[in-house]
Image (cartoon, rainbow, N blue to C red):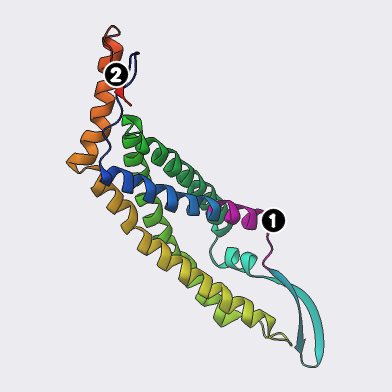
Amino acid sequence: MDSPGVLMRRPNRPVLVLLLAIAQLMVGGMLLCGGALNLIINTAGSSAQTVTITTNGKSTTRVYDTREEMEKEAPGYKLFLHGGGIVGFALAAVMVAAAIGLLGCRGWAWWLSVLWGLFELAYQIATAAYLWLVAMPAANRMVRAVPRDDAGVCGGLVNGNTLYHVGWALFASGFVLYPLLILLLLVLPPVRRACLGAAENQMEDIRSPRRRYYDEE
């Protein structure tokens, strides 16, 4: 049964657009949660431990902080942590917003997804470059210069710090492929036509307010 009214056309959404939007929602949601957790850890978390070091029979107690040691070896490291965390969280939020728009084949969502892909690609490349070229050498220098405390706590902290940066660098390097894949899918004719064609239809509706469209129930 037809119901009259001035209605927008129901979006002609190909399966590829639906799968793309779902993938972006899932990955973006995980990155958003991970980014929020990362911001909390970077802001409120601590990488410090109180250790006891015995030298020539004399024991001294000090606080050993891997983050502060990384800052000494790689000035600007804490700025990288906080700034990168904020940028990553913002990109994840944009990713989710664009994915929601893609479900409705919105033209703005297509453009926003393209912009997200370009910025995400640049962000991951820059992050991976910093981790491999700056953070990893700094972590390796810490391994060689770590103080030998009585309980071996410093060694565990430094080794964990190195593994953390290796894992992060591998993720950033591998994740470069994801925005590349999304950009390639976005420029495919079916996806582009579904989103940008819908936007053109909406503009046509605005220019011709007397036209009536009906949805079949």
**Is 30 a magenta residue?**
no
Give the image location of residue 152, x and y in percent. 68, 86
Give the image location of residue 86, x and y in percent. 54, 47
Q: Say which quarter of the image contains residue 199.
A: top left
Height in image: 171 above or below 192?
Answer: below
Along the line of sight, which residue is nearer the eye, 160 or 15?
15
| Marks 1/2: CA–CA distance | 55 Å
Q: How many marks?
A: 2
Q: Say which quarter of the image contains residue 12.
A: top left
Say which element carries label 1.
helix
**Is 43 a magenta residue?**
yes
Residue plotted at (35% across, 38% down): 102
Along the line of sight, which residue is nearer the eye, 129 or 19?
19
**15 with respect to 62 (left or right):** left
- Please identify the residue farthest to the front as the structure is shown: 1
Q: Quadrant of the C terminus?
A: top left
What residue would you read off at disc 2?
214
**Nearest to N terminus: mark 1 or mark 2:** 1
Residue plotted at (28% across, 18% down): 203
| Residue 123 disc label | none
What residue would you read off at disc 1?
44
Give the image location of residue 115, x and y in percent. 34, 40
Residue plotted at (40% across, 51% down): 123
**1 with respect to 76 (left or right):** left
Magenta residues, start to end? 35-47
Height in image: 205 above or below 49?
Answer: above
The amino acid type, in three-letter code, at marker 2 is Tyr
Residue plotted at (63% across, 70% down): 66
